[in-house]
Image: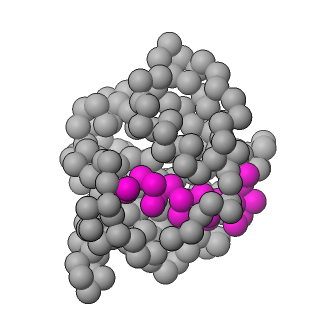
Amino acid sequence: MAQSGTTPTNPIRVTLSDGTLAVVRPIRPDGAPQLIEALNNLSPQARYQRFLYGKHSLSPDELRYLTDCDGINHIALVLLLTDTDGNELYPVAEARCIRDQYDTSMAEVAITVADQWQNKGVGKHLLKALANAAVAVGIERWQAFLLHSNTAAFKLMETVGTKQSELPEYTAVLKVTYKLHPNLFTH
């Protein structure tokens, strides 16, 4: 069942730093075509930063996993541009957290923002909404696997939490844990 937890079911309307209107809402099972299109529109660098390798496609099983989320153990949100009437146009970012099965107060987090929409507040709006949803279901900490060179991701993560640890995972990858601050999240 998609989004049966406390993930917001009503879109959260936001205005980006350039005045563009958007909404944040849960990813739905019928969002697979949008997810494929979004992946196809990412630059090679953005794909590498998100997947830590040059992922080119998603299998049917991956698409099902990434779009059919329960809102409790797997929370996934999308930010879509809208027209002035609030009609959804197309997605420009997605973020998700997946609860750790052994430490249920921890979840792995990931975010992807389309190249042309970076540095406009997209990631900040989306990550704040995801953090609100995570805290509401008892997730207190996020763990992210980040490239050393992805300074934008480190800066973005610090808008929703305090870094607790940073450990080398692979040659160019760090495993970073953040304690979420729920009192910071207002829209």
| Location of residue 65 in the rendering, given as x and y in whole percent from the top left corner | 49, 53
Q: In this view, does 24 lie to the left or right of 21?
A: right
Q: Nearer the viewer, residue 93 or 38?
A: 93
The residue at the far top in this view is: 171
- Residue 135 is at least partly visible in this image: yes
Q: Which of 101 and 14 is in front in this view?
A: 14
| Location of residue 19 in the rendering, given as x and y in whole percent from the top left corner | 27, 68
Assign the N terminus to one quadrant of the image: bottom right
At 41% across and 62% down in the image, what residue appears?
Answer: 78
At 22% across and 78% down in the image, what residue appears?
Answer: 83
Magenta span = 121-140
Within the magenta stretch, is there residue 134? yes
Instruction: Classify 173 as above or below 48.
Output: above
Q: Which of 29 and 92 is in front in this view?
A: 92
| Location of residue 140 in the rendering, given as x and y in whole percent from the top left corner | 73, 52
Instruction: Classify 83 as above or below 63.
Output: below
